[in-house]
């Protein structure tokens, strides 16, 4: 099954969309490799990893014994007994754990690569010993192996289908849409002098009105350790990027304007606006990771909608009515000292 990129539309990328559970893990893996895959050469064709008939029991857990490399350039990272761990295995695990931002660029000489490789070696050692002891033959092991296989093949479906939707063209299209939707935002640059009392602030305002250099005065008397050595420079900021009291005063002043003394939780300030501009738009590379995440979530949603049309879902257990919750041992339903169930406080 494959899915197309989300249809063109003017949708803002949600700022705080948070995937849940297994989808979050799949999202991490897809996002980690999607950007690099947009410009990569097609993978070298390989034979199927396992026979389709080999799907039951202990064999499910030990298919790693005969897995070929992911592609022709996939190097061996370690040998454990008669088995092999490839570099692609390490990068895939690093993506799943969200250890690095770009697992595709993870080099075997990196400390993070070696740490993940150590984990995979230990995991492989335990799996080999479990196989030797015949632990994969118990009913409980088979049940858990089947659940693991279900999760893994579902994740592979999502990674494959959704990755097809995260193309360079789709990334560029969404970027252009977001730039069209984003309003031009004003930002300004200012500097300030922070002191403890109103009297000190008034004296500073008087000195400035007489022509004293703002930056020099800030270096001499400002109590702000973060800006004093820079002459009080606060850098560029938007209305939402600074204290509300600062924003109200700063955005009411013209360039070159000096405020009257005003107070915040930090003390008393005198502020000067030094420049104004429209905030520069972020470049494509700056937005790439966020866009890939957005396209991935959209792809997962579309894929699940398609699958639900093929496989009807019926919930056997009815969910609790809205506003109610299941009883816990610390709330409704807990037994009192006399052995009776507590009725709770209706008020």
Image (cartoon, rainbow, N blue to C red):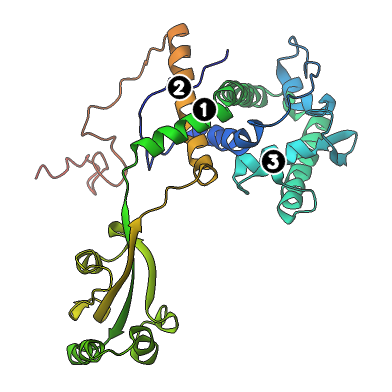
Q: Toward the viewer: 178 or 289?
A: 178
Callout 1: SS: helix
Q: Toward the viewer: 144 or 323?
A: 323
Position of residue 86 measured from the top left corner of the image (x, y, whole percent): 81, 36
* Circles 1 and 3 in contact, beta carbons < 8 Å: no
Comes first in the chain, label 1 or label 2: 2
Q: Toward the viewer: 148 or 258?
A: 258
Q: Which residue is mark 2?
A: 6
x 19%, y 65%: residue: 252
Left or right: where does residue 6 sit relative to residue 218? right
Image quarter in which the C terminus is found: top left
Q: Which residue is mark 1?
A: 170
Position of residue 97 measured from the top left corner of the image (x, y, whole percent): 61, 44
Comes first in the chain, label 2 or label 3: 2
Q: Which residue is mark 3?
A: 104
Q: Nearer the viewer, mark 2 or mark 3?
A: 2
Position of residue 45 measured from the top left corner of the image (x, y, whole percent): 79, 19
Q: Nearer the viewer, mark 1 or mark 2?
A: 1
- Residue at the far right: name it: 82
Q: Residues within 10 Å of mark 1 (few under 14, many from 20)?
A: many
Q: Nearer the viewer, mark 1 or mark 3?
A: 1
x 76%, y 21%: residue: 59
Q: Residues within 10 Å of mark 3 (few under 14, many from 20)?
A: some
Callout 2: SS: loop
x 44%, y 80%: residue: 230
């Amino acid at each position: 099954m494959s899915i197309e990129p989300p249809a063109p539309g003017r949708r803002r990328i949600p700022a705080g969309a948070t995937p849940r559970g297994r989808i979050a893990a799949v999202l991490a893996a897809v996002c980690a490799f999607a950007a690099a895959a947009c410009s990569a050469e097609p993978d070298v064709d390989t034979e199927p990893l396992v026979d389709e008939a080999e799907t039951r029991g202990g064999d499910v857990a030990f298919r790693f014994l005969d897995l070929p490399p992911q592609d022709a350039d996939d190097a061996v990272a370690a040998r454990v007994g008669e088995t092999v761990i490839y570099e692609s295995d390490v990068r895939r695990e690093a993506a799943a754990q969200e250890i690095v931002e770009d697992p595709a660029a993870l080099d075997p000489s990196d400390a993070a690569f070696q740490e993940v490789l150590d984990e995979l070696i230990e995991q492989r050692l335990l799996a080999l010993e479990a196989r030797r002891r015949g632990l994969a033959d118990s009913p409980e092991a088979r049940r858990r192996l089947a659940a693991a296989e279900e999760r893994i093949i579902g994740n592979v479906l999502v990674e494959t289908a959704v990755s097809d939707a995260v193309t360079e063209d789709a990334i560029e299209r969404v970027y252009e849409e977001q730039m069209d939707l984003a309003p031009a935002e004003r930002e300004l640059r200012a500097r300030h002098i922070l002191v403890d009392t109103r009297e000190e602030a008034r004296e500073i305002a008087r000195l400035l009105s007489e022509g004293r250099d703002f930056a020099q005065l800030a270096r001499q008397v400002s109590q702000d350790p973060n800006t004093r050595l820079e002459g009080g420079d606060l850098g560029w900021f938007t209305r939402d990027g600074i204290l509300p009291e600062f924003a109200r005063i700063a955005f009411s002043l013209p360039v070159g304007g000096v405020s009257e003394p005003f107070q915040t939780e930090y003390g008393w300030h005198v502020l000067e606006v030094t420049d104004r501009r429209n905030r520069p738009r972020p470049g494509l590379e700056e937005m790439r990771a966020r866009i890939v995440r957005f396209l991935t979530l959209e792809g997962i949603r579309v894929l699940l909608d398609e699958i639900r049309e093929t496989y009807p879902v019926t919930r056997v257990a009815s969910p609790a009515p809205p506003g109610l919750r299941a009883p816990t041992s610390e709330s409704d339903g807990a037994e009192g000292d006399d052995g009776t169930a507590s009725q709770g406080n209706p008020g």
